[in-house]
Image (tube, helix red, strand yellow):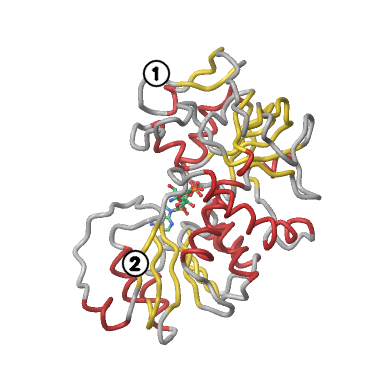
């Protein structure tokens, strides 16, 4: 089969399409003939050598796929040959065949294309497990999500809308600002023209209830200073660094929680638990059109280098996808 591989960490050009063996499934897995694979920021960090595959995971990039079931393990229930599925996978997505655990594999919701389905797992599993399960999101809360037009940002905004949240977001240009406003986000700040901290302070709220952040760096103190009593700061990345000087007094005085998580290292049973909740609360909203998977661009596997450049250059809105 063809797959994307790289021998040494480095820029997008280290990735090459190579021939390799089709992987062997165990009795609890299915083999997916991959049609599309989502491209995520963690793939870039892995390619650069800063996010190695955990032991036992495929070294081939790619954390989410859609396609057709082409082999079924003897213990697998509810999935059969030829089913159209998508899956959150332990690497190996950028290839023509990919192993998928049954717990993290699902039949594609009605009205969702194979292309869009490949872009659901990584962002929706991450967002749901952090803001709903970890953050215990409640209806009508005030929530700030950084990077509103990223894959993560758009998933978060749409989940927050289900909870009737008052949503705040940051974006890097006015095109992205308009996109978020059209989605119904009440407070959108172009961080290159406005300081989101000063703008939110001007609104004279008693404080935000939750912040989902992957920027870190100087955002960490600003975020903490925007949270109200019992507010929660959830970090799922630190694009601008994770070392800061913090005065912890405000955590005590306002009962703030600082938390975070990475999805990849969690086991299949935990990921399966997230999937069960997504099936119940989120997938019906894909089917009725309330939630969409926004695709920025689709690249052929031969153009994998261009797909990473597209994500890194940063003007994308929504997800970048590879076609196998
Ligand atoms: N912990 C986990 O389990 C987990 C799982 C998946 C993803 N993540 C993390 O989540 C983040 C997003 O992933 P993704 O795949 O959705 O990537 P993506 O689409 O490439 O998003 C990156 C975003 O960062 C925004 N950004 C950069 N600097 C910013 C700043 N100073 N303020 C606000 N926004 C800024 C960019 O927007 P502009 O171009 O407009 O600046 C862009 O939208 C990544 O850091 C990734 O590592 C974590």
- Foreground residue, 107 or 289? 107
Indicate the position of residue 26 as horizontal and vertical percent values.
59, 27
Q: Are dots 1 and 2 in contact, CB under 8 Å?
A: no
Q: Is residue 283 left or right of residue 304?
A: right
Q: Residue at x 54, y 47 (%)?
A: 269
| Residue 124 in sight in this render | no
Q: Which residue is mark 1?
A: 7
Q: Secondary structure at mark 1?
A: loop
Camera-nearest label, 1 or 2: 2
Placement of the N terminus among the 4 image quadrants: top right
Q: Specify the quadrant of the image occupied by residue 105.
A: top right
Provide the residue designation for mark 2: 258
Percent position of residue 288, x then y: 79, 61
Furthest residue to the front?
Answer: 75
Instruction: Mark yes or no: residue 313 visible.
Output: yes
Where is residue 143 shown, x and y percent of the image? 49, 72
Examine the rendered structure and indicate whether residue 223 appears above or below residue 98: below
Quarter of the figure with the C terminus: top right
């Amino acid at each position: 089969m063809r797959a994307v591989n790289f021998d040494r960490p480095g820029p997008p050009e280290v990735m090459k399409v190579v021939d390799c063996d089709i992987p062997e499934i165990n009795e609890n897995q299915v083999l997916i003939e991959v049609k599309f694979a989502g491209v995520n920021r963690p793939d870039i960090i892995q390619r650069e050598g800063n996010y190695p595959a955990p032991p036992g995971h495929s070294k081939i990039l790619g954390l989410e796929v859609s396609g057709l079931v082409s082999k079924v393990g003897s213990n697998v229930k509810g999935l059969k040959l030829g089913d159209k599925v998508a899956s959150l996978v332990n690497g190996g997505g950028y290839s023509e065949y990919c192993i998928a655990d049954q717990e993290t594999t699902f039949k594609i919701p009605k009205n969702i294309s194979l292309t869009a389905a490949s872009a659901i797992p990584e962002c929706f599993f991450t967002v749901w497990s952090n803001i709903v399960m970890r953050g215990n999101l409640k209806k009508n809360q005030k929530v700030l999500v950084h990077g509103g037009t990223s894959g993560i940002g758009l998933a978060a905004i749409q989940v927050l809308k289900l909870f009737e949240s008052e949503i705040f977001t940051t974006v890097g240009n006015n095109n992205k600002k308009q996109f978020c406003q059209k989605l119904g986000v009440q407070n959108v700040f172009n961080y290159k023209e406005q300081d989101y901290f000063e703008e939110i302070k001007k609104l004279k709220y008693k404080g935000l209830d939750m912040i989902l952040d992957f920027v870190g760096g100087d955002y960490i103190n600003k975020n903490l200073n925007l949270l109200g009593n019992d507010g929660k700061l959830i970090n799922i990345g630190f694009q601008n660094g994770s070392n800061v000087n913090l005065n912890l007094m405000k955590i005590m005085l306002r009962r703030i929680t600082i938390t975070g998580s990475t999805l990849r290292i969690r086991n299949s049973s935990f990921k399966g638990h997230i999937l069960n909740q997504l099936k119940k609360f989120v997938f019906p909203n894909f089917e009725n059109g309330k939630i969409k998977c926004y695709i920025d661009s689709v690249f052929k596997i031969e153009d994998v280098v261009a797909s990473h450049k597209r994500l890194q250059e940063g003007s994308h809105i929504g997800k970048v996808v590879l076609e196998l």
